[in-house]
Every structure is written in structure tokens, then in C-alpha cells.
């Protein structure tokens, strides 16, 4: 019977203590973020000095370190991101986790030996998308967390055939937005979740104008897949990922320990000949299990994970059961035990009055919270003074005032956490013995050969010949002292053999130190390869290539204004405006029968393919590509774009593919794209820089008008509005359901939860994107302005109004004679209603803060 390795346990490391706790608990790898370009900028994160030390510590315990560079990056940031990645590699990290296609392409081209992992933000949910990742050297892919075990099972052999390992999210906070690609935070505050600045708007309370009580319609429970550990083994998953870089060392240790024990238990139940055993240092070596795992029996969920932060648990995605039970009724930490409510507090006497305080006893640690999870204070009960009065001792500075109505929660885990912290900080290098043999004679260089207990060998020669010693020459004591100064390396000097060295010879101590350093960096355990020495990396553009226009039978300009709609009749009306050869029509699911009513449709209509297409529905969309001789298509799905290119059909890469810099656009060009729509969060300055860098290589498109999509999700967001009795969301819902409702946030923002046939649930901003001010600054850097006239279902417009808006932007962009008048500008604003400019503000710099609706 052949063996298969146990999956890697990939743990979060939001700070040095958490990294140490992960190693202590038995993680195989830890992922960390630095001070820039990581999707958890609110975590403490790691600096480069700490990173080098942590890499050395981790490697000595057989643990790998990965660095995340997993955010949207603008044109002027890519060089800094590449330099930071090189700094991380120089510090000893084992792999980079990357979201941006441009950065992936750069590292694959310029640092081909670097190990590259695809972030979940690349939304890999269809096997066709794996081809793109393989082209850019990806060796491990974090699949979209919405996939079921059955869907993952189909992925594994294809990924392995392409040389990629499969990583699956198994524990921690779910993001309700599909694979974490969310625009809600940016829409509400200007802080982009795709830039690591998420405000967790999905955890906030919303209300419905229908008179319903405030609800948490976007608040999912946490993932907990421990009960499916055996299933993941059987499927062949290579890495199980734990989320939680903001949770702290005790959370990390608890969850990693639960998974370590569970996997080791499964390996032991299978009586594998190569079962991992915890060594004295607490590290784990690779384990293996039989490749035939049909008889695996899961004995239950480890309850230890319920003792640390969670919002309740669900494994609905993995189970393929997307039900209302996946939603949490509270966003507070469900591991805490409620002790009562504050009635009052006297600071001078440190007396706290509490209601329903039957569980509060002397010596207990407790916390005071206000407004869900807003932390105020932590204290120890010194004495019970009466039924509701307690003498307390605050353990640190208050984070606010202790006031009536605040809630008390038990902090029983503090003692256990203190033990973990003490052990984590005491974790020492797991040193391997390093034997050294030295040899040399007068007039020749000194040769030192280093042999580690793992069989690693390194040789170092002196840069100068050995000379006669005037006094004390080189001897075993001196050589042991200098060659044994191994500092924070994972080695300790073992046996020194100097029998091959002539007596009475001299070599400067500085040269002995240099020889030791030169030898140690050759040893794999030290992982000190120098990839590049640079403070900033220039990302040069490849040789310019002009995009061929033969597919449209015309030369530049391609089409100054390109309109998007979701109705065939309206597309025909827009065609009559004469804005160019094409109008884009969003497909309403894989049913394209309405095209039969327009026999010449392939000549002028550009079908828009959606961004979320699972393998079960992919053949139907491929059939749409094959049925007609399309001159051009628009795809938000990279896999379908590649299918179009393979069929000889030019395609435009949509904005949800997040082309935010020229290298990422070129990566899409490598898949056959002839044009790219700029990522929706770019500012005018950033879009202009990207366009200038691309020049004539690709068609450059920017959306200046349209509805604002905040998120898509595999969950059902409309159940409460439609009184739906379907017990769980399934493919039939995607194909047929039409429903929607309005949600309001206390900040004044209004959103619409919409379910359209052919689409997953979507959340739209009540305001439209309307940025006529962006047209003039982008005139030289953009080929085509996109005017998105779709109607998601909450702000219908007449045909007359739609044609006016299209004509307005056509004149503004210079396609038609005459700029819009002031009266037309006023009419536009009245037609559009509440609107904002999104990232498209002339001053640029970052995503703009939206205006409050009037």
C-alpha cells in the first residue's frame, strides 16, 4: 500500500508570539504579513528584523514561513512590493502568497526559483482558472472557501497534474463576500478590504424599511472543519489553512493544537508505518497515511476550539449545505461566558455593582465590554462585598469609561494563555549537531568542512594562506571557540577534528569568522540564500506590442464609449446611437435562447460572462461561446476568457479580475485578452498611470458610470425578503430565483440585496457611480470609457433616460460633437439620484470616501 503525506497545517502568525505559539503547537507552516501589502493591515504584523529571527527559529523546528503580499496594487506600488518580497526571501521565508497577477508574473520571470502561492483573493473556483496560475509558476493554490468537498475532490487531480498543491481553508472567520473579494468597506468608508483595510462591515447591524427588527444579514458563523479532517485526507488536500492573524497567540495555539492532535490521531488509527511523533522541542516531521482512505472514521470535533474566539461554528460550504444556519445571530465572541450587567462603578473605592452576578466569585478574571465586542476593561475580583457589589483590581489601563449597561464576560482562559505565552517565548532553537574537520599546511589555505547530523555538507576555504605563528598557533581550543560561534543559527558545534592541520600555523581570527559564516549560509537548514540586494525594484515593461485590431476591422480608436446593458431590446436601441460597432449585453445565466431573435447578434453584440461560474455550469457557457462566431466577448472569469481565446475569439478582461497595474493586464494578455477594464477601486491618477504604462499594448477601458456592486456571495441574502421555504441554496436557486430587498445601516448607507436569475446573491450600493469629472483627466490614458446601464433591480430607468445618459458621456468623451451643457449636467444628476465617484477622483491617491446620501 502506497503512502500519502498528511496535509500541512498552515497557521496564522499576526505577531511574533503567535508565530512561536504556532510552532509550539505543531504547525508545519506559518503565514505572516509585513508592514505593507498584506490583507490584514490591522494585525500587529512582523518587521524584517523579526522575520529573519523567526525564520531561523521555525526552520530549526522543521516549520516553514510564508509571507503574504495579497492585496490590490497600483502601478507605482508594484516595484516596492517586489522589493519587499525579495527582502522577505532574503530573510529566509519559504514562499510568497500573492494576489496580484502582475506581481506573480514578475517573480516568476525574475526570480524563477522562488516558491509562489496563489492567494484566495484570486477566487479560484473553476479548474479552468488553474491554467493561468500554472503559467505564472504557482506551486500551491488556496481554493475559494465556498467550494464543497465534492468540488474540491474534482480539483485535486487537475492541480496535481499541473504541479500545484491544494490548500483549503478549515478554521476561522468566513468572509461572506465570494472568496474575500469585497467592495462593501470601500463603499461605506473609503477603506478598501482589497487593500487590507476591511472594517468588517458585514458584522454590523442593518435594518429593513419594512419595519423588521435590526438584523445581522451578512454575519456568518466561523468555519470549523475538524469534523471533516478525515474527508480532507481522503480527498487528497495538501494544506489545511487556519485563519486568525488578528486573534492572538492563544487562539493560534489552541486551534493548531486541535488540528495537530486530530491529524496525528487519524494517522495513528490508520496504523501508518510513518506516523509523526512530537519530539522534545514540540516540532513535527512529515507524517503519511495510506492513500486508500475509504475506511477513515472521524471520532468527532475537538472541543478545545470552543474555548477561544468564535461566532458559532459551521462547515456548511465544505458540506455543500448552504443554509440559514450558517448565519450567526450575534457578532460577539461566543467563547465568553456572560456574567451579568454593570449597574455602576465607583473608581475611588474600586467597587463594581453588577446585576445577575451569581457566577462572579473571588479570584475570577472578567472583562467588561460595550456595544457588542468593544473592549473596555479587564479585572480580577478581590472580594465579594454583598449580593451585587464586588471589590475589583483593574489589570491595565481602561479603554473607556465603565458605565451602566455594559456587559461582563468571564475570561477563564487567561491562566492557560499565560502558560502558553511563557512556553512560546521560551521556545529555543532546535539545534542540530555540526561536526567540523579542518585541514591545512604552511603556505596553503585552511580548509574547513562542516557536516550536520542531517547529512548536510558545506566547505569553506580561507582567502589567505596559512602562515607561521609567532606565538600560539591554531589549535583545537581556538578553532572550537571561533568555529563554534553559531549564534542564532540552528546548529551547535559537535566534534572538531583537527588532525589534518599542521602545528604552529597562524590565521587571523577575522578570517576564521568569515569562513564559519560562509559555510553556514551554504547549509539548507540556515536558509539564508541571498536572492537580490536592492532597496527598490524597478518593474520594467516588456517590449511594446500593439494589440491587433483586425478582429474589429478598424484602427484606433477602438470605440470611445462602450455601453453595457442587460436587455437585448435596449442593446438594439443603444446600437442605433452610432457610438461604435459594439454594445455589451450581460448574460442572464447560461440560457442564451433570446439571441435566436437577433440573427446578426454576433456581429455587434458583446456577451458579458459572469465572474462566478462553477465547473457544473461551465459547459453551458462554453456552448454559448461555440454557438456563434462572436467578434468579441467580455469575461469577468479568467477561465472563460481563456476558453474564448482558445476558440479564436478576442476577449475583454472585466474589472472584477482586478487589473490594477500594467503587469497584471499583461498577464491577462498572455491568456488572449485584447483589452482590460481597470479595477473598480483605482483612482484617476492610478488608472492614468496604468494606461500610460500599457500604451498601445492593450485596449484600456475605465468604467465612469454604472451601478456599484459591493459583493457577491454563494449565500442567500434575500430569504428574509421573499419568505422563501427552500431549506438550502443550490444550483436551481442560481438559475431561477428573482428576489430582493433594501438594507439600511445606521451610518446612513443604503444597500440592496438582489438575486437575479443566472446570478448568485449580490449586494449593491443604493448610489450609482457617476464620474463625468474623470473623463478629461483620462483622455490620453484610456481608449474606451465604459457606461454601464444595467438595471440590477432597484433603480429602473426608462429607455429615453438610458439613451440620454449614453449620449451625455459620448459627447463628454468627444465621440459626438459638442460638450454637454450645464442643463444636461443637471438633468444627469437628477436622473442618477444618489451617486458618488468611487475611486475616480481627479486628485487620486486612494479609494475615495463616499458622500453621505442626501
Image (spheres, rainbow, N blue to C red):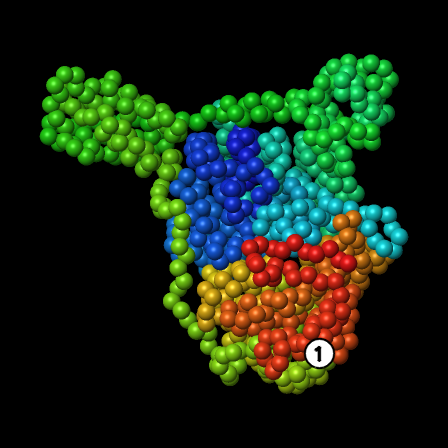
Q: Nearer the viewer, residue 436 or 575?
A: 575
Query: In the rendered view of the protein, which quadrant contains the C terminus?
Result: bottom right
Residue at the far front: name it: 822
Neighbourhood count class around disc 1 (C-alpha, 10 Å): few under 14, some 14–19, many 20 upward: some
Q: Residue at x 47, y 34 (%)?
A: 50
Figure quadrant of residue 271: top right
The answer to whether residue 626 shows anywhere in this view is no
Residue at the far right: name it: 211
Give the residue pinned by disc 1: 803
Q: Nearer the viewer, residue 155 or 325?
A: 325
Q: Tell me: 167 left or right of 523.
A: right
Q: Position of residue 360 (x, y in %)?
A: 79, 21
Tag 1's secondary structure? helix
Q: Position of residue 178 (x, y in %)?
A: 65, 54
Q: Nearer the viewer, residue 545 or 323?
A: 545
Q: Tell me: 781 left or right of 217.
A: left
Q: Residue at x 75, y 32 (%)?
A: 369
Q: Position of residue 15 (x, y in %)?
A: 55, 34
Q: Residue at x 16, y 23 (%)?
A: 506
Q: Nearer the viewer, residue 446 or 154?
A: 446
Q: Position of residue 333 (x, y in %)?
A: 72, 35
Amino acid at each position: 500500500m502506497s503512502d500519502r503525506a498528511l496535509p500541512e497545517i498552515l497557521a496564522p502568525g499576526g505577531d511574533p508570539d503567535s508565530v512561536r505559539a504556532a510552532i509550539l503547537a505543531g504547525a508545519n507552516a506559518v503565514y505572516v504579513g509585513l508592514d505593507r501589502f498584506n490583507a490584514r493591515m490591522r494585525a500587529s504584523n512582523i518587521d524584517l528584523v523579526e522575520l529573519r529571527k523567526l525564520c531561523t527559529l521555525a526552520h530549526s523546528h522543521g516549520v516553514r514561513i510564508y509571507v503574504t503580499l495579497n492585496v490590490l496594487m497600483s502601478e507605482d506600488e508594484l516595484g516596492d512590493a517586489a522589493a519587499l518580497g525579495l527582502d522577505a526571501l532574503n530573510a529566509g521565508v519559504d514562499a510568497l502568497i500573492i494576489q496580484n497577477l502582475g506581481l506573480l508574473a514578475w517573480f516568476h520571470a525574475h526570480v524563477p526559483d522562488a516558491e509562489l502561492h496563489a492567494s484566495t483573493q484570486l477566487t479560484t473556483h473553476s479548474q479552468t482558472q488553474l491554467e493561468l496560475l500554472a503559467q505564472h509558476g504557482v506551486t500551491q493554490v488556496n481554493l475559494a472557501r465556498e467550494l464543497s468537498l465534492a468540488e474540491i475532490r474534482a480539483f485535486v487531480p487537475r492541480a496535481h497534474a499541473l504541479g500545484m498543491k491544494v490548500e483549503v481553508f478549515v478554521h476561522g472567520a468566513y468572509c461572506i463576500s465570494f472568496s474575500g473579494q469585497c467592495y462593501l468597506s470601500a463603499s461605506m468608508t473609503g477603506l478598501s478590504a482589497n487593500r487590507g483595510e476591511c472594517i468588517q462591515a458585514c458584522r454590523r447591524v442593518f435594518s429593513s424599511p419594512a419595519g423588521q427588527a435590526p438584523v445581522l444579514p451578512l454575519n456568518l458563523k466561523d468555519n470549523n472543519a475538524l469534523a471533516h479532517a478525515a474527508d480532507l485526507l481522503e480527498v487528497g488536500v495538501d494544506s489545511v489553512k487556519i485563519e486568525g492573524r488578528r486573534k492572538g497567540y492563544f487562539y493560534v495555539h489552541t486551534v493548531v493544537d486541535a488540528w495537530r492532535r486530530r491529524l496525528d490521531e487519524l494517522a495513528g488509527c490508520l496504523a501508518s508505518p510513518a506516523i509523526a511523533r512530537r519530539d522534545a522541542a514540540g516540532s513535527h516531521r512529515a507524517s503519511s497515511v495510506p492513500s486508500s482512505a475509504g475506511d477513515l472514521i472521524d471520532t468527532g470535533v475537538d472541543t478545545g476550539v470552543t474555548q477561544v474566539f468564535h461566532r458559532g461554528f459551521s462547515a456548511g460550504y465544505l458540506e455543500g449545505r448552504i443554509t440559514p444556519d450558517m448565519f450567526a445571530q450575534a457578532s460577539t465572541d461566543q467563547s465568553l461566558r456572560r456574567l451579568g450587567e454593570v449597574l455602576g462603578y465607583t473608581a475611588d473605592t474600586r467597587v463594581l455593582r453588577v446585576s445577575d452576578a451569581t457566577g462572579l466569585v473571588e479570584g475570577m478574571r472578567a472583562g467588561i465590554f460595550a456595544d457588542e465586542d468593544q473592549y473596555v476593561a479587564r479585572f480580577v475580583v478581590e472580594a465579594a462585598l454583598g449580593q451585587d457589589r464586588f471589590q475589583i483590581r483593574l489589570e491595565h489601563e481602561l479603554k473607556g469609561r465603565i458605565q451602566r449597561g455594559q456587559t461582563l464576560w468571564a475570561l477563564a482562559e487567561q491562566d492557560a494563555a499565560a502558560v502558553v505565552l511563557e512556553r512560546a517565548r521560551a521556545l529555543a532553537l532546535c539545534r542540530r549537531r555540526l561536526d567540523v574537520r579542518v585541514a591545512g599546511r604552511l603556505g596553503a589555505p585552511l580548509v574547513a568542512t562542516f557536516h550536520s547530523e542531517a547529512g548536510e555538507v558545506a566547505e569553506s576555504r580561507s582567502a589567505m594562506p596559512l602562515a607561521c605563528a609567532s606565538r600560539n598557533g591554531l589549535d583545537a581550543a581556538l578553532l572550537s571557540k571561533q568555529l563554534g560561534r553559531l549564534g542564532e543559527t540552528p546548529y551547535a558545534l559537535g566534534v572538531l577534528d583537527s588532525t589534518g592541520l599542521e602545528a604552529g600555523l597562524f590565521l587571523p581570527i577575522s578570517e576564521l569568522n568569515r569562513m564559519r559564516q560562509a559555510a553556514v549560509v551554504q547549509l539548507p537548514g540556515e536558509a539564508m540564500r541571498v536572492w537580490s540586494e536592492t532597496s527598490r525594484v524597478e518593474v520594467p515593461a516588456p517590449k511594446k506590442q500593439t494589440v491587433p485590431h483586425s478582429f474589429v476591422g478598424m484602427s484606433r480608436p477602438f470605440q470611445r464609449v462602450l455601453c453595457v446593458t442587460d436587455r437585448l431590446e435596449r442593446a438594439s436601441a443603444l446600437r442605433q446611437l452610432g457610438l461604435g460597432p459594439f454594445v455589451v449585453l450581460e448574460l442572464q445565466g447560461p440560457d442564451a435562447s433570446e439571441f435566436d431573435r437577433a440573427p446578426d447578434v454576433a456581429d455587434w453584440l458583446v456577451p458579458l460572462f459572469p465572474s462566478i461560474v462553477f465547473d457544473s455550469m461551465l459547459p453551458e457557457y462554453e456552448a454559448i461561446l461555440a454557438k456563434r462566431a462572436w467578434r468579441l466577448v467580455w469575461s469577468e472569469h479568467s477561465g472563460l476568457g481563456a476558453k474564448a481565446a482558445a476558440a479564436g475569439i478576442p476577449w475583454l478582461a472585466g474589472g472584477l479580475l482586478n487589473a490594477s497595474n500594467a503587469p497584471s493586464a499583461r498577464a491577462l494578455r498572455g491568456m488572449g485578452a485584447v483589452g482590460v477594464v481597470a479595477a473598480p477601486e483605482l483612482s484617476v491618477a492610478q488608472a492614468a498611470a496604468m494606461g500610460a504604462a500599457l500604451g498601445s499594448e492593450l485596449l484600456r477601458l475605465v468604467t465612469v458610470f454604472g451601478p456599484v456592486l459591493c459583493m457577491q456571495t454563494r449565500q442567500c441574502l434575500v430569504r428574509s425578503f421573499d419568505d422563501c421555504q427552500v431549506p438550502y441554496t443550490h444550483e436551481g436557486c442560481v438559475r431561477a430565483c428573482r428576489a430582493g430587498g433594501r438594507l439600511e445601516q445606521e451610518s446612513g448607507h443604503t444597500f440592496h440585496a438582489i438575486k437575479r436569475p443566472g446570478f448568485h446573491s449580490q449586494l449593491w450600493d443604493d448610489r450609482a457611480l457617476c464620474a463625468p469629472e474623470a473623463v478629461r483627466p483620462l483622455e490620453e490614458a484610456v481608449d474606451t470609457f465604459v457606461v454601464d446601464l444595467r438595471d440590477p433591480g432597484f433603480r429602473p430607468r426608462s429607455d429615453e433616460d438610458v439613451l440620454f445618459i449614453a449620449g451625455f458621456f459620448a459627447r463628454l468623451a468627444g465621440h459626438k460633437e459638442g460638450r454637454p451643457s450645464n442643463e444636461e449636467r443637471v438633468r444627469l444628476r437628477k436622473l442618477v439620484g444618489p451617486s458618488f465617484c468611487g475611486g475616480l477622483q481627479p486628485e487620486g491617491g486612494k479609494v475615495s470616501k463616499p458622500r453621505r446620501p442626501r
